[in-house]
Structures are given as structure tokens and as C-alpha cells.
Image: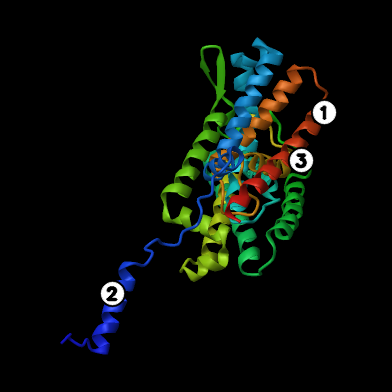
Amino acid sequence: MSETIPPTRRSAQDYETAVDSADRRVAAFDPHRRGPVEKLQHVLHSNPTLVPVIVLLGAVAVFGVVSGSKFFSAFNLTLIMQQVSIIGILAAAQSLIVLTAGIDLSVAAIMVLMSVIAGNLAVYSGVPAFLALIIAFVGGTAAGMFNGFLVTRVKLPPFITTLGTWSIFYALNLWLSGAQSIRSQDIDAAAPLLKVFGETIAIGPARITYGSILMVLVFLVLWYMLNRTAWGRHVYAVGDDAEAAELAGIRTGRTLMSVYALAGFVCGIAAWASIGRVGSISPQAFYEGNLQSITAVVIGGISLFGGRGSILGALFGALIVGVFQSGLRLAGVDVLWQVFAIGWLIIIAVAIDQWIRKVSA
């Protein structure tokens, strides 16, 4: 007689047979093959500084061909560095704010105000130049903290806040100075230390100012702070998504306050460098510095939406503006069309940023 298999054992055998014969393939998405344009988009998204570097090298090559040896002369190249040194330092301060998804329309006004304060103290009040500069640094930090207080505590939009404080600081410039400039001769006689960053170092035919070296050092220090410290990671996190950063335990208000304070301190450094660059102190100097600093930041590939970009991009952005202005001037292009070209640069830079951001969308 044949053995009768119990129902429970039979069902187990049927299950094992079914499992052995089942399709063992795992569900998977079809691989998406990226085209050349998408690959380029991803590369630029991963390396935001690459765009301004490419533009800078392209501009140097084009103007070198158009203008020839005049453009590549040591005198002209070092002159470009001198011309962008102050706007470059202001762009460094502006970059800190933009990385947090804000904007600061008062950076140039803070800078000029601190130069007026340092000049009045050192030239007219008999305060030692070194102490006058310390007071200017503290004042710049305080001005930045005032902006930060309005943004973090009063909850005002950064654009409106700094638009208002720009008017306040500019009015203080005129009041403290009596709308009068401090002459170069007076500074030389009473406080030559104020003009130290206007002095040059001769390297062959090149003449490099201490102000140009200062600009590079400011960018390198801020790059280290943003990329090698926990504070820098917090800045990027706040700029990318403030609510998510707060949920992750980051004290967003304190981080923003520190960013605005540091930006103000950098404006104080720019004030010292600007005295050496211009040679005198005028309450109406660098009137367009706010917009020029934003221009350098935007062209440098730092996203106006915050959280993306390298502060070194702002350095390249400032150099791009300097190269365009120098190249167009040597080519005999009218100043009007130089401004026209810079305007298109800004529009193209923002368009590229929008295109690159679609990668993460």
C-alpha cells in the first residue's frame, strides 16, 4: 500500500516546490543614461566654483587675443588685482550673508563709515592709529550685529533690513565727516598706518599692493572657516533649509548673528584697506560698492537661494569683473558698454545657477 501523506506535510512540500521554481529576479529601475548635457550639469552642481573659473580663463584668453601684450603685461595684471581688492573684500563679507539665503545692501556703507571713524579719530582727535583701527573693527562688528539683531530677533527680511541700515550708515557718514574728505597729506602727517595697504611690493616688473595680498588672505581664512569647522557646516545648513537645521539641533539664530557680526568685521578690514587704496577718506566713496559686491558673488557661482557655492567663487567673480573692465577698456570700448556687458554677465550667471539647481529638484 502507498503511504498517505498528511495534508500539512503535502502543503509544505508544495510550498517548497513553488519557492524553488519561483522567479528570483528583484525589481529594479531601468538605468538612466545621462547625456552630455546632464553630465555637465551634474559636474557643475558638484563643483560650483568651476563655472567662474571657466569664465575667468575664457575671458583672459579672449582679451589676451584681442588686446595682445598690453593685457598680459605685469603692470596691467597687477592693476586688475589692485582695482578689485576692495570690492573683493566686500564680496567676501557679502558671500557670508548670501550663503545663509540673505543679502546685505549695507556692506559698503559700513566700510565707509568705519573708515570715516578711524580717520577722524586718528587725524583730528589725536587717537593712535592702531587704537583707531581697533575701534573701527569693533564698530564694524557692532554694525553687523545690529543687522543680525533686526533679522534674527525682530524677524525682518534681510533685504529690507539692510536697505534701511544702508541709509542709516550713509547718513552717519555724512554727519560725522561734515560731508568733507580727509586729505591724503593729513593722513600722511598724522596717521600713515592707515595707508599701509596702499604700499606696493616690487616683484620684477609687477607691483603688488599689500591690499591685494590682504584680499587673498581674507578669502583663504573664510574658506577654511566655512569648509573645515563645525560653524561653517552650520552656515551652509541654515542657508539650505533653516527649519531643517533647527530640527537637527543647530541654533539658527545664533549662527545667523555670528555671520552678520563676522561680515561687519570684514567690512572693518575693508575700511582699512580702502584708505590705502584711495589715499584719502571720503564719505561718498564706493557708493556702488554694495551692488558691485553682489555682482561678484552672483558671478562667482554662489546661489542667491543660500546653502550652495564656495566663497572662493566670489574672489573669481571679482576678478572676472576686473578682467572684463580692463579688457574692454584696452579694446577701446566705451564705459557705457562695459556696464552693459557686466549686466549681461549677472543675468547669465543667475540663469546658469537656476539651471544647475534643477539637478537637486
- Give the mark nearest the N terminus, 1 or 2: 2
Q: Dot 3, crowdedness within 10 Å: few (<14), some or many (≥20)?
A: some
Q: Determine whether 320 is above or below 331 in the image.
A: below
Residue 286 coordinates in the image, percent (x, y): 72, 38
**From where the camera sits, is residue 186 visible?**
no
> Which residue is tagged 1?
337
Left/right of residue 77 with respect to residue 176 in the rendered view:
left
Residues at marks 3 and 1 touching, judged by CB atoms closer than 8 Å:
no
Q: Determine whether 287 is above or below 250 in the image.
A: above
Q: Is mark 2 on a helix, strand or loop?
A: helix
> Which residue is tagged 2?
16
Q: Dot 2, crowdedness within 10 Å: few (<14), some or many (≥20)?
A: few
Left/right of residue 29 with respect to residue 70 in the rendered view:
left
Amino acid tagged 2:
Glu
Viewer-proximal residue, 106 or 15?
15
Residues at marks 1 and 2 touching, judged by CB atoms closer than 8 Å:
no
> Which residue is tagged 3?
284
Amino acid tagged 3:
Gln
Residue 123 coordinates in the image, percent (x, y): 64, 38
Viewer-proximal residue, 47 or 160?
47
Residue 105 coordinates in the image, percent (x, y): 71, 50
Which residue sits at x=17%, y=85%? 2
Q: Is mark 1 on a helix, strand or loop?
A: helix
